[in-house]
Image: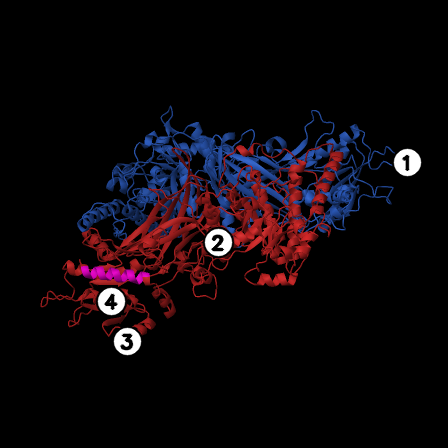
Chain colours: A blue, B red
């Protein structure tokens, strides 16, 4: 019962899972299906069907045309050799004998299949020309009929070298000809020598034996199919109308290749009949590896469709009068009705392969709490960075941030530990006076209190540890201040001293009973961190308030934070940012906040060069009061102070100590392409000062740390530093990432650059490329 | 006497040569020169002098600052280790004690030299930060004073790896700070281990022994200095204010490296005292290789200046009272006067090195006929391509084209040979009739006659060979037609039948005495070739008229033409095109006509893969009448003609036979960068049909053929197919160039793409990069 109700959308225990959208392709089909045939295929459980654009008649006609041309050419020139200076044959337009496809109300639910026998990369200029003409004729006609998707067979093994540019250019032209339809390139996940699709192509007819020999002996080049795809979509400028269909192989490849395709715009996963095994009961089934692969890809935001190849029913099967008599087929209208619902009604005629896929559909792990529609809608969605110091937030924004219990639990834990240790270590408090040297009241300040979540946590920590405190809350946003005033009355029993001020302009705490004296702060609590740690100017804000911190005992929560980087491949984001450049010329020099999802981490995990590397660190309070005071001290010491201070980019250099630079080396064993760097942060909120054995209280958004340090924390998405141009790299590469945090005393920005070096021998490393130097100066964060 | 008069600009036999502009740099100079000292240096023959921006006082102050900082840091942190989380020292602004440089009326003729002791790439974050501050302070101050040129010492050997990105970014920042001055990076031509400039840098003071060891053992990496420069200017986005000064080495390197630097924006050639040898008379001199190197670079359109380093006089020499007394120095005003003339007056005090350089100046080969100012002004000057079919030319443009005797001599030779062979082979003429089967009058047609130069040549050829002809001249430009009418009366004795028509619409010749019959043409003469052969639509125009050519004997002059390509490095053109993109978004997809000069052919000359490779060929007349007729024949033969013809890009495919495609492989042994492909053509105007032993009459603009086939022909400059982004390649690379000539029946355009493959083992070739697919469709040539 319970397992049933978990599948019932009306039930409370309903568990939601990705939906499988299953289609059928028959590689021997020579004509589009008739209405009746189409209805029958739908009834056997499929949701869509492929249809060849042209038929055998067209094929025969093209072959005859070229045969006639060759004969005539020989008569004209006396030679059998192709001569590129001679006009080649021109394929006449389609007639109604060449196709069974016409505009219809269900045509847009068909996937139209281009002729697999063309040979776009043929070294024979006439064959490649005919092939290109056929592709254009078919793409144009399918587009005319209203096709949404046109599937084009991918380049073959022997085209991956010299011919790939020619193939890619032809696809670009076809996209120009078919100017509305999506074009889907059908590729193997990797090329298995000897397991390539066998198709009789024009080349095999007219130039038999011209293909490369001994193909089977070659090593499997796992990334060659991906590489071909990468060339095609690069030549097509990452068009949003270009997708890839990948053919699931018999042997599931290693994770790196699976992840590579995960980042690509997968439109179909295609599964041939021969990938299925028969289980003990004689039913088709897939191996565990195949299941895991499918489950993984089904987690994509745009769920790929499943296309089963040659699993029946075949046209001759479904068209036989016997079958017609045996089953009662619903009309086309009825079938369309079924299509509109979420599930096709189970009929006794359901295809066994579809039945098995439906079973797999139910076996998927249900969506987790982190996969709610609200959260998945953020996947790969680019958000421009905040200007937290220049802008004021709205209440709803605060509410979103406050909705993350993990983060505030960690803060409360940090404050609690700090209070306990303060007592254990018998540190003096700022409230101590000569008259009352052991006054136990700790001075706690929450700077940038917003709507007060950290104030509440600090009060709870004080209560749970029995710590007497004096608490200040500072907030610059005048509207949030009103909210705080009310909350102080209603919730906090007026225990909190509220100050409406930018924390950098605060005069400091006037202690209770000693209002004439400006005191110091024992524990300063702030939540100023951005996705990259320092990117919302936490260092600059804390610089502006830390002179109020008691020395040497005062504590800043957070104690420190680090920024981390990893180069990634993320074609969708590249396409997205490219499409913005017209309206936003800085789009490629903007660090975007984005819930990265369809990405491939290209860097390997190796001990010296991990996948995620630390760029830099900030520690608070810094050991000197303020950079300018520090510099002034040196200036005086060196006796050269001349009225002004140092000069940096024409400014006075007071924020120079918050500049940073890193140079990181990432190791990539396989070839690939990167579109930018993913950025993350970690922060130590509080580290025990008694040391030994005590874990620091941390938060982290690093993919390999978040589950250990702050599981299910959702307050921060990663940051993405894009590259203007995708940077390709060969195998055994080191990506050297240089990044700078720059400042001119009024704003802060980042600059980044990637260099590619390949190892080509045990001691030889060559440079193979460099990105532009990118700078976010024009969209800098204002101080 | 004659040698004297050849140097006198007033004389008729005056020979012009590049002028040497010679300056002085003293590496031990710690202060800018005083006015008096400056005057004396000018009097010793120099035209400009370098001046350090800051002095010893500033240096001491910076060193003291850091020393004090280190001490204080140790007190604060108890550690001697640099800690990037700590604020570093801020260099205070300059005072009048730090510099001897002030705005003055001759400051813009000084080359200002940045402190060579900074270390922008130091791994110690504080040292690199101080260095950057020093560079910015100096650059800003020099810019304030009105400096035109600021020289910055280039990155050192050990900075060429990890540090180069940091160096490059610092230069970009300095260009931002000094926003008017030119920045010149002083580089060695190549890095000679052990022969690097020895300078005590901040790193050598504060981190002695931190540099790489055993440098001397390494092999010379000839291209490492160029590579560093390439990174710097790439990061600086090929700024037009960024130049390079190259230090001439003791051993002149191989030609490939010389040519690499030839293409770069050379501002200075610097020559150290120790590069000079003493000749038998004890005077300084340079080796023959050095002389040739200098002579070569002096041929650049922007002639580099020569900077002699440490050849005296030294400040202490020129400042000594004894010297002061010994010579009578002109005042500063007098010296400035001298500067304005072309030559510094020879005074007894002339520096012997300058004297020698003046001697070399006179020894240069004089400018040739191809180096007139009119011709050199076209060097590297981008011209948008012509639209010869859509636009009409002006008389002056025709006049320029007619001014090339070489081309028309070759045409006359071709027509002459054709006429002679016609007679020898006893071919029938089109004027032959049943009544007069041996009528000897050849029908000659000049199509696109312009102002008639080819008509004149055809008439001369007929006269010289005694060939009776009937001659037609077709011209579509109505204004040129007026000119032709007059010329026919005045010069041609009304022998020419003039027709105002587009040659593609001509009805054909109405033969004399048989005006009711449309005859055929025996010899068709056209000059429709562009820089790339077919780029001004010669194939399409000849298609439109060749049905009037007599078959099978009719002759087209030209008989055939071929297009040729070579990948090139040409940073100036890249910078130029980049600067046009705002106003012309297609600038990088336009094939530019340009007299390529400051370029480097990166491809090696190897037998299988020469430097210049043929892309494709066109032959006239084509063996079939018209492409559409030919296709129609096939259509009929195959019985599938359905009223229309074939479809190509949605068009009818009638021009498809003029589409072309090539895939060429170029071999590059050394690393480099390409900015596009240079395009050229060759044409066989007439090839003897009796064959054996007879050279065809040709014209060629291929750099390695023009002198042999059509020496001093100036009618065509090369064509340049640019790349949007410079494409870097490592050593042992193959550049695979794909190019297409595309057509949609109304226009013709090119598409091009470059792929980079590197050999990394005897059998292993890896892909390292691909350019975008470029297309000139938006600036296509209209048919």
Observer-nearest of A669 and B596 = B596
Observer-nearest of B34 and B105 = B34
Measured as percent of width and height from the top left, residue A314 is found at: 30, 37
Measured as percent of width and height from the top left, residue A183 is found at: 39, 46
Q: Secondary structure at mark 2?
A: loop
Q: Which numbered disc covers residue B298?
A: 2
Chain under callout 3 = B
Task: Mark 3 or mark 2: name the one nearer the start of the chain.
Answer: 2
* Badge nearest the viewer, 1 or 4: 4
Q: Which numbered disc covers residue B490?
A: 3
- The residue that mark 1 highlights is A435
State the separation of the CA atoms marked 3 and 2: 48 Å
State the separation of the CA atoms marked 1 and 3: 123 Å
Report the magenta residues as a range.
B406-420
Q: Which numbered disc covers residue B460?
A: 4
Is circle 4 on the same chain as circle 3? yes
Outermost left residue: B435
Q: Residues within 10 Å of mark 3 (few under 14, many from 20)?
A: few
Q: Is residue B545 visible?
A: no
Tell me, yes or no, whether the two marked residues, 1 and 3, touch with CB atoms within 8 Å: no
């Amino acid at each position: 019962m319970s397992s049933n109700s978990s599948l019932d959308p009306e039930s409370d225990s309903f568990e939601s899972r990705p939906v499988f959208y299953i289609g059928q392709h028959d590689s021997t089909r020579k004509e589009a299906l008739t209405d009746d045939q189409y209805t029958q295929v739908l009834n056997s459980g499929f949701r869509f069907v492929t249809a060849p654009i042209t038929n055998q008649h067209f094929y025969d006609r093209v072959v005859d045309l070229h045969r006639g041309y060759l004969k005539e050419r020989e008569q004209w020139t006396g030679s059998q050799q192709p001569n590129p200076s001679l006009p080649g044959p021109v394929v006449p337009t389609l007639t109604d004998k060449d196709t069974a496809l016409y505009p219809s109300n269900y045509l847009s639910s068909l996937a139209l299949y281009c002729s697999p026998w063309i040979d776009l990369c043929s070294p024979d200029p006439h064959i490649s020309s005919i092939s290109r003409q056929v592709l254009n004729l078919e793409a144009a006609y399918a587009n005319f009929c209203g096709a949404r998707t046109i599937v084009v067979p991918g380049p073959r093994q022997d085209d991956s070298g010299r011919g790939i540019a020619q193939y890619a250019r032809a696809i670009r032209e076809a996209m120009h000809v078919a100017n509305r339809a999506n074009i889907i390139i059908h590729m193997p996940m990797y090329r298995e020598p000897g397991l390539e699709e066998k198709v009789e192509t024009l080349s095999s007819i007219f130039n038999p034996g011209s293909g490369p020999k001994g193909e089977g002996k070659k090593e499997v080049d796992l990334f060659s199919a991906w590489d071909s795809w990468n060339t095609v979509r690069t030549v097509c400028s990452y068009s949003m109308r270009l997708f890839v269909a990948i053919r699931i192989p018999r042997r599931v490849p290693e994770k790196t290749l699976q992840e590579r395709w995960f980042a690509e715009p997968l439109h179909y996963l295609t599964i041939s009949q021969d990938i299925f095994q028969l289980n003990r009961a004689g039913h088709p089934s897939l191996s565990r590896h195949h299941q895991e692969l499918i489950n993984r890809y089904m987690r994509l935001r745009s769920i790929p469709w499943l296309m089963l190849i040659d699993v029946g029913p075949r046209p001759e099967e479904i068209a036989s009068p016997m079958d017609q008599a045996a089953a009662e087929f619903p009309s086309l209208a009825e079938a369309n009705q079924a299509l509109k619902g979420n599930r096709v009604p189970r009929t006794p005629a359901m295809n066994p392969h579809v039945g098995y896929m439906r079973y797999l559909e139910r076996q998927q792990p249900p969506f987790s709490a982190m996969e709610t529609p609200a959260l998945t809608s953020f996947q790969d969605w680019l958000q421009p960075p905040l200007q937290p110091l220049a802008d004021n937030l709205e209440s709803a924004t605060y509410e979103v941030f406050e909705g993350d219990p993990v983060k505030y639990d960690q803060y409360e834990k940090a404050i609690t530990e700090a209070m306990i240790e303060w007592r254990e270590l018998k540190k003096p408090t700022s409230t101590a006076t000569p008259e009352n040297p052991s006054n136990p009241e700790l001075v706690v300040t929450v700077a940038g209190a917003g709507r007060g979540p950290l104030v509440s946590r600090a009060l709870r920590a004080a209560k749970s540890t029995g710590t007497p405190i004096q608490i200040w809350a500072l907030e610059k946003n005048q509207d949030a201040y009103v909210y705080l005033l009310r909350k102080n009355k209603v919730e906090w029993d007026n225990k909190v001293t509220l100050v409406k001020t930018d924390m950098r302009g605060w005069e400091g705490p006037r202690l209770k009973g000693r209002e004439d004296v400006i005191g110091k702060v024992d524990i300063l609590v702030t939540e100023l961190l951005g996705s990259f740690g320092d990117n919302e100017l936490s260092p600059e804000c804390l610089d502006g308030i830390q002179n109020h911190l008691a020395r040497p005992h005062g504590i800043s929560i957070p104690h420190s934070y680090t920024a981390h980087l990893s180069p990634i491949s993320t074609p969708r984001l590249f396409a997205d940012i490219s499409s913005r450049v017209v309206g936003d010329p800085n789009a490629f020099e903007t660090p975007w906040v984005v819930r990265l999802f369809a990405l491939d981490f290209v860097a390997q995990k190796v001990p010296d060069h991990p996948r995620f590397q630390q760029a830099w660190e900030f520690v608070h309070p810094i050991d000197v009061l303020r950079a300018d005071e520090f510099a002034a001290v040196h200036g005086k010491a060196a006796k050269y102070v001349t009225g002004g201070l140092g000069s940096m980019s024409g400014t006075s250099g007071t924020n120079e100590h918050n500049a940073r630079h890193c140079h990181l080396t990432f190791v990539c064993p396989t070839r690939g392409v990167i579109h930018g760097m993913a950025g993350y942060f970690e922060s130590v909120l509080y580290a025990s000062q008694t040391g030994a054995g005590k874990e620091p209280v941390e938060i982290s958004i690093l993919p390999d740390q978040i589950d250990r340090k702050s599981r299910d924390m959702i307050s921060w998405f990663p940051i993405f530093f894009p590259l203007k141009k995708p940077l390709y790299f060969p195998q055994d590469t080191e990506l050297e990432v240089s990044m700078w945090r720059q400042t001119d005393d009024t704003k802060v920005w980042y600059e980044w650059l990637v260099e590619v070096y390949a190892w080509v021998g045990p001691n030889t490393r060559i440079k193979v490329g460099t990105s532009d130097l990118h700078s976010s100066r024009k969209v800098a964060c204002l101080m």
